[in-house]
Amino acid sequence: MHQDTPRARQRLFVSDAITAGAEMALSPEQSHYLEHVMRLKPGTPVKIFNGADGEWLATISELRKKKGAVTVESRLRDQQNSTGPALAFAPIKKQRLDFLIEKSVELGVTRLMPIITAHSITDKVRLDRLQAQVIEAAEQSERLDVPEIDAPVKLYDWLANWPENSHLLFCDETGSGSPIGEYLTESLAKPAGSVIDNNNVVNHTLVIGPEGGFAPDEIDRIRKQSFATAVSLGPRILRAETAAIAALAVYQDRIGDWSTRPVTRD
């Protein structure tokens, strides 16, 4: 960022297209947050993004009674989408699910897929609530994109409709698979055309079981899929949210974007 660029400490997601000079309305929640929580005033610079047009510098032009607007100034960063894996997970208890969603977004997950299993504690997921959490985590972590969230689907239906050019990493709590880090490292050297070859596979999906683990028949069904590979997360039993974070961290370290330098901050 140039030295004469105003410092913008707050970052907001907007749903509309962003163009230089446009005035963009803020949601009542955003307006309340900026005015009453952060105590900002008109004229204060902020950053905005929409997941498609990059990141922009904007200036608060109006802020009163839960009504606000910003004027778009200039583009700070061109659009760049995350290249991390998708994450499939069985819904867990509210506080732990909140943690899982937040940290997964921070770790670069590209898609969130709730799946219903035999031991799932619920088959209901409030997608609007998850979407709000995803946006907040994307704002905080300075991502330029926002992960997609799928509607909940039963495990067997999910497996039966598996997309082409996608590979499933089954985080198997029985420990029967290779250590995930070892497998990912070895996968980089596989010949072109192999199922895990990163030049041919469009994306990878990590799947984490529910708090009670997968049922034996579910484990057997996943293992039999030609697109799936069982991997181990070590010798200890992990909570679902811990397993998700551990798997994502190893993935990003071994074949993900952790070799990429962070954005330059003012």
Image (cartoon, helix red, strand yellow):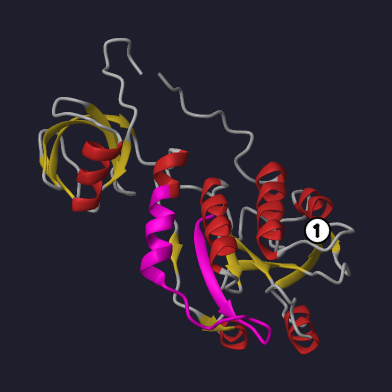
* Of 204 and 117, the residue lying toward us: 117
Which residue is at 64% across, 54% downward?
198
- How many numbered marks, from 0 up? 1
- Residue 117 occupies which quadrant of the picture? bottom right
When the figure is inspected, residue 43 is found, relative to residue 94, above or below; the finding is: above
Which residue bears the numbered disc 1? 233
When the figure is inspected, residue 245 is found, relative to residue 4, above or below; the finding is: below
In the rendered structure, does residue 235 fall within the stretch colored magenta?
no
Q: Could you say where residue 215 lies in the image, as x and y percent from the top left?
A: 76, 85
The answer, for residue 257, to whether it is visible in the render is: yes
Which residue is at 13% across, 43% downward?
68
**Span colored in magenta:** 109-136
Secondary structure of residue under mark 1: loop
* Of 253 and 132, the residue lying toward us: 132
Which residue is at 47% across, 28% downward?
263
Number of residues whose C-alpha sits closer than 10 Å to that of mark 1, classed few (under 14), some (14–19) or many (20 or more): many
Q: Is residue 5 left or right of residue 145?
A: left
The answer, for residue 163, to whether it is visible in the render is: no
Which residue type does callout 1 highlight? Leu
Q: Is residue 153 left or right of residue 24?
A: right
* Of 57 and 162, the residue lying toward us: 57
When the figure is inspected, residue 118 is found, relative to residue 99, above or below; the finding is: below
Q: Could you say where residue 226 lies in the image, as x and y percent from the top left?
A: 72, 78
Q: Could you say where residue 254 lies in the image, as x and y percent from the top left?
A: 72, 44
Q: Which residue is at the far top?
A: 3
- Residue 210 occupies which quadrant of the picture? bottom right
Q: Which residue is at the far front?
A: 36
Q: Could you say where residue 126 lies in the image, as x and y percent from the top left?
A: 42, 73
When the figure is inspected, residue 193 is found, relative to residue 73, above or below; the finding is: below
In the rendered structure, does residue 132 fall within the stretch colored magenta?
yes
The C terminus sits in image quarter = top left
The N terminus sits in image quarter = top left
